[in-house]
Image (tube, rainbow, N blue to C red):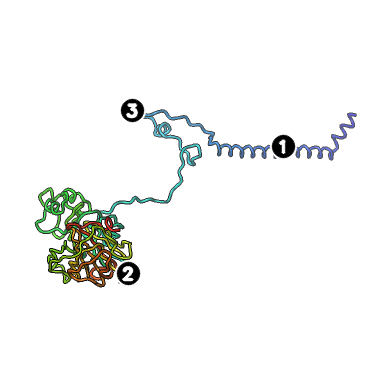
């Protein structure tokens, strides 16, 4: 048996085959270990990515005060101090390492109120009220900023006019020689401090301190909150006993004392269209309403009374009729295309007196309609039915 085994071991072919099998086995085991190692490394990296866990643990730095730093030995190196004072830094923030905010490229610029006067070119269809509303102003502020153009008359507004628009409600004043802050403020019922403090006026306060005005002659100044009277361009209070007082107003004035119909104190709508266009009632700027319609539409007497003005007005209202109702009330109808009554004539509620037009300072066919009681103009919308 021993000789047989010895023969096998001495056989070169068999020994070579045995060694080859052993090598293959070792190679296969090595490859398996490499694959297992790669998989283990991959699993570790994935686990580290999702858990945020790091292999290096950094202990929390103790609280360091200025006194502690000052007490450190001079021989301590800057590197050692850095190790104590600096917090751990993570180059790539993870979901658990803190709040991470993405870059937002949109920039929001806050809206700031303007303080300078700007200009606006009047467009077709604009009214004093619409322009004022679009820029957050009162209608009278638009008039006060443009006296040279509008002469305080809203009916002088026309397309292509260039208007000054103040940044705040108030008046606009060109400084004159001898003016003072107190004097101008008093003139417009405003506070001197409001003029001085307004940033759009660019007043040199150093001159004020040294006794100067701080404002050059010819400079335009904004008077915040300022006001001044606005002329009423409508007809004056005309009664059947004082008809001659309107003689200056135009050729339609009547000069006699009249007797005739007396009104009921109730009022009907003066035309077929019941919509207000452009100007509504404003006691400071437009003490009447403008009623829309087509040129030639019938105009009716809102109540019974006597005609005390019938004809052309020199103050922008074109052809106009005024009726005295004999009970303290008067009514006026302006911008007519035709006048169908005459001075002293009695008219009755709902009776035809004229036709709608576009005469005088008017930008389109409409009826300018006023009501007044004992000389005080009131809103017709509160009384007509």
Q: Give the spatial CA distance, label 2 vs label 1.
A: 105 Å
Residue 172 in percent (x, y) is at: 19, 57
Which numbered tag is attached to residue 67?
A: 3
Residue 143 vertical placement versus 186 (above, below): below
Tag 3's secondary structure? helix
Residue at horizontal 59 percent and vertical 37 percent from the top: 44
| Mark 3 burial class by Cα count in 10 Å: few <14, some 14-19, many 20+ | few
Q: Is residue 216 left or right of residue 352?
A: left
Kindly tell me whether residue 286 is visible in this rendering: no
Q: Is residue 5 left or right of residue 327?
A: right
Tag 2's secondary structure? loop
Q: Quadrant of residue 315?
A: bottom left
Sequence-first disc among 3 and 2: 3
Q: Give the spatial CA distance, label 1 vs label 3.
A: 63 Å
Nearer the viewer's eye, disc 2 or disc 1? 2
Q: Write down the residue under mark 2.
A: 294
Between 90 and 25, the one lying in front of the other is 90
Q: Give the spatial CA distance, label 3 vs label 2.
A: 91 Å
Q: Quadrant of residue 29?
A: top right
Q: Is residue 182 left or right of residue 116?
A: left
Q: Write down the residue under mark 1.
A: 29
Nearer the viewer's eye, disc 1 or disc 3? 3
Nearer the viewer's eye, disc 3 or disc 2? 2
Sequence-first disc among 1 and 3: 1
């Amino acid at each position: 048996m021993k000789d047989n085994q010895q023969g096998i071991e001495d056989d070169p072919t068999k020994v070579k085959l045995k060694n080859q099998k052993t090598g293959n086995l070792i190679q296969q085991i090595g490859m398996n270990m490499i694959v297992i190692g790669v998989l283990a490394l991959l699993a570790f990296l994935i686990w580290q990515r999702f858990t945020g866990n790091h292999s290096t643990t950094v202990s929390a730095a103790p609280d360091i005060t200025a006194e502690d730093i000052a007490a450190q030995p001079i021989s301590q190196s800057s590197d050692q101090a850095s190790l104590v004072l600096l917090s751990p830094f993570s180059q790539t923030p993870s979901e658990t390492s803190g709040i991470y905010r993405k870059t937002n490229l949109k920039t929001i610029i806050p809206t700031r109120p303007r303080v300078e006067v700007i200009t606006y070119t009047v467009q077709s269809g604009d009214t004093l009220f619409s322009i004022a509303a679009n820029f957050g102003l009162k209608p009278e502020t638009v008039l006060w900023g443009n006296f040279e153009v509008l002469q305080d008359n809203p009916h002088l507004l026309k397309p292509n006019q260039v208007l000054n628009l103040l940044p705040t409600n108030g008046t606009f004043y060109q400084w004159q020689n001898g003016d003072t802050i107190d004097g101008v403020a008093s003139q417009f019922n405003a506070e001197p401090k409001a003029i001085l403090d307004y940033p759009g006026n660019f007043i040199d306060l150093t001159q004020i301190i040294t006794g100067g005005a701080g404002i050059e002659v010819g400079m335009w100044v904004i008077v915040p909150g300022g006001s001044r009277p606005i002329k009423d361009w409508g007809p004056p209070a005309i009664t059947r006993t004082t008809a001659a007082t309107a003689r200056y107003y135009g050729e339609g004035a009547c000069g006699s004392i009249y007797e005739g119909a007396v009104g009921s104190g109730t009022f009907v709508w003066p035309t077929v269209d019941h919509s207000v266009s452009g100007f509504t009632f404003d006691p400071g700027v437009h003490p009447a309403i403008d009623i829309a319609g087509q040129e030639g539409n019938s105009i009716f007497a809102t109540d019974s009374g006597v005609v005390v003005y019938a004809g052309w007005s020199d103050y922008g209202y074109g052809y106009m009729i005024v009726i005295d109702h004999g009970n303290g009330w008067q009514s006026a109808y302006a911008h007519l295309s035709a006048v169908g009554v005459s001075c002293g004539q009695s008219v009755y509620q709902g009776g035809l007196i004229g036709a709608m037009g576009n005469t005088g300072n008017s930008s389109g066919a409409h009826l300018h309609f006023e009501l007044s009681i004992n000389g005080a103009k009131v809103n017709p919308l509160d009384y007509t039915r």
